[in-house]
Amino acid sequence: MKERKLFKALECLDVHELAAFRKFLQSPFFNVNEDLTHTFGYIEQKFRTGADIHAISNEDIWSVVRPHQPYDDQKMRKLLSDLLVLLESFMAHAEFARKPALQLSMKLEAARKKYG
């Protein structure tokens, strides 16, 4: 089975980070695609039960996310790619939250741009 970047990245998250990522995905500010939330939910459930997430096939995920549609490999790969992009955004937000000096600097820069 081909090793997927998404699954490899998810394995690096601890239980608290997985929960925070789930909340991130559920936020309409960051994610408007419900399929991504369902995809992560399925993968997370397998991960939490100790299943080898690398053994999960794209067809398995598709059958849960879009059970009444025939499998479409291109759409499935796009879905996983979009989920990886959101995971990377989540990790960037988490890192930003751990750096108050950077936050202050960015706030000042944004205020300077906005208000001159």
Image: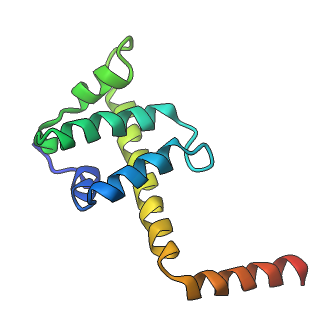
Q: Residue at x 22, y 26 (%)?
A: 60
The spot of residue 61 in percent (x, y) is 28, 29
Q: Nearer the viewer, residue 30 or 70?
A: 30
Q: Nearer the viewer, residue 2 or 8?
A: 8
Q: Residue furthest right?
A: 116
Q: Nearer the viewer, residue 31 or 48?
A: 48
Q: Residue at x 28, y 60 (%)?
A: 13
The spot of residue 18 in percent (x, y) is 33, 52
Give the vertical position of 57 relative to 64 (above or below).
below
Q: If the image is split into quadrants, where does the C terminus sit?
A: bottom right
Location of residue 53 (image quadrant): top left
Give the vertical position of 106 relative to 21 (above or below).
below
The spot of residue 96 in percent (x, y) is 51, 75
Q: Residue at x 27, y 58 (%)?
A: 9
The spot of residue 15 in percent (x, y) is 27, 55
Give the vertical position of 33 relative to 84 (above or below).
above
**Relative horizontal placement of residue 44, taking residue 19 as reference (left or right):** left
Q: What colouring style does the render use?
A: rainbow
Q: Residue furthest top?
A: 68
Q: Nearer the viewer, residue 89 or 58?
A: 89
**Relative horizontal placement of residue 43, taking residue 56 as reference (left or right):** right
Q: Residue at x 28, y 41 (%)?
A: 44
Q: How many marks?
A: 0
Q: If the image is split into quadrants, where does the N terminus sit?
A: top left
**Relative horizontal placement of residue 31, taking residue 115 as reference (left or right):** left
Location of residue 50 (image quadrant): top left
